[in-house]
Image: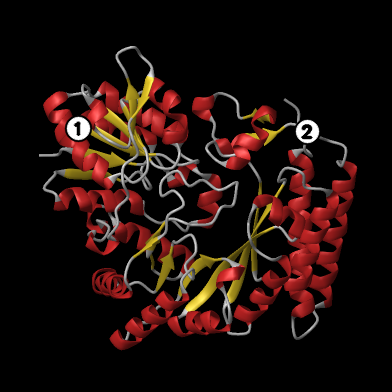
Amino acid sequence: MTDILLTHGYFLMADPAERAVMKPYPPLGLLYISSHLKAQGFGVEVMDTTFMDMDAAQATLARKRPAVVGIYVNLMTRGNALRLATAAKAAGATVIFGGPEPANYAEEYLSRGGDIVVSGEGELTLAELIPHLARHGLTELDQVHGIAYRGEDGGVRRTPARKQIADLDAQPFPDRGAIDLERYLQTWKTHHGVRSVSLIVARGCPYTCNWCSHSVFGHSHRRRSPRNVADEIELIRDTYAPDQLWFADDVFTINQKWLEQFAAEMKRRGLRYPFETITREDRLNERVADLLAELGCYRIWIGAESGSQRILDAMQRRTNAVRMREMIALVQNRGIRAGTFIMLGYDGETWQDIDETARHLRLSAPDDVLTTISYPIKGTPYYDKVADRIAGGGAWQESSDRALTVVGRKSRRFYRHAQHWLAAEGRLGRLEAAPQRDLLRHAKARASSALSRLAMYATRHEVEHG
């Protein structure tokens, strides 16, 4: 018997950007919930929509008619999640929304098919909710911590926050067997020549970057033991035979002592996989870089966000732009690719700040650069700061916070040209750092840089409007 059907509303083939990349990973959060609930004796089914289309997903809900449907929602999946909720309600289900977004928009989700919104981690809350719903339906929900729901007067009620899971080692590993993981591995193999599996070693980030959402894990940081993580990697090895791993943590190298112990545990077991992950410059040093190389890290993403120290301070990043460049060189000297993230358009950013970021990329020459144009995420200090100037997005149910903009800052068109300029400056940095000069590629990069800079100048007076 199925007590709950879990799904997430991400459809790979409907996302042009993701189709171009073709590096899908399964929804680990849902798989953790599935394994937790199954360990508690609940009947759980996971409808993984990654390789489905909307029609098939809706038909599945109509055919299965689950009593309870839990839908994970993030910034990319709002519209799809709402469509799935409509189909679930039509099939007679109680709909529970969870994930990083719904808690910030409880009123909107409860108005569009949701019966309950879960805030924070879902395992313990759902383990209490499922039997409660079976006994009491949608009454007496005030007894369940960590949720929002509609009271008898129609207003939104929020119960006290639920305590977080303290001992992550006591949690079962993600329920990868509930989905067709081989489909993910074959997709990777077809497009990139390797089979890649994702895992996480910790939950939460203690840092206070004011544009970053902490709606699920708060500012906590809880870490699994090195032995527990190595156990999972052995299970992944024996079950799926991957070629590489993706540690999907916010800051993988946050604890050097843990990393030392993990490297020793992996060496003791004879485990070594190429992997990539994410960190910050202040969580890197020579010893950490050596450990990463020893463990098999082939690329590490270092969150830069800006080359302007003024903007980094405004973001409350607590990082140093100069040291960022030093850390990029540090990992590159150990044969590790250095990737970096750049965010343009943060409130108050000037032309000079963008110039500083371009200079940063030119000097540091990271191997890979991903740029975004900043957007305010509800529930963050940045959103609150610019709340009276937020515009865009269109109809809420068909949009996302990624579509929001800030009135008065430079236009999206200007920033698209700035993105092209930064990409060209990054290429120039890499070409100049190369042992041999490629004159043709260098000339093309310089031309691209000049044209993008000219386009920036031509659109410098364009600003975002309400």
Give residue 184's position: percent from left, percent from top: 36, 58
Per the image, the residue denoted by label 1 is 66
Q: Which image quarter: residue 202?
A: bottom left
Classify residue 233 as left or right of residue 296. Answer: left
Label 2 sits on residue: 408
Disc 2 and disc 1 in contact, CB within 8 angstroms: no
Examine the rendered structure and indicate whether residue 301 appears above or below residue 404: below
User: In the drawing, does residue 230 fall left or right of residue 375?
Assistant: left
Quarter occupied by residue 283 = bottom right
Task: State left or right for residue 416 relative to residue 151.
Answer: right
Look at label 2 and name its amino acid.
Gly
Q: Which residue is drawn at 82% across and 72% down?
A: 442
Confirm whether residue 240 shows in the render.
yes
Viewer-closest of 237 and 294: 294
- First in sequence, mark 2 or 1: give its number: 1
**Picture quadrant of residue 172:** bottom left
Crowding at mark 1 (Cα within 10 Å: few <14, some 14-19, many 20+) = many
Q: Residue 338 carries which label?
A: none
Q: Which quadrant does the N terminus fall into?
A: top left
> Helix, strand, or loop for circle 1?
loop
Task: Give the total of numbered labels.
Answer: 2
Residue 447, compared with residue 193, is above or below; it is above
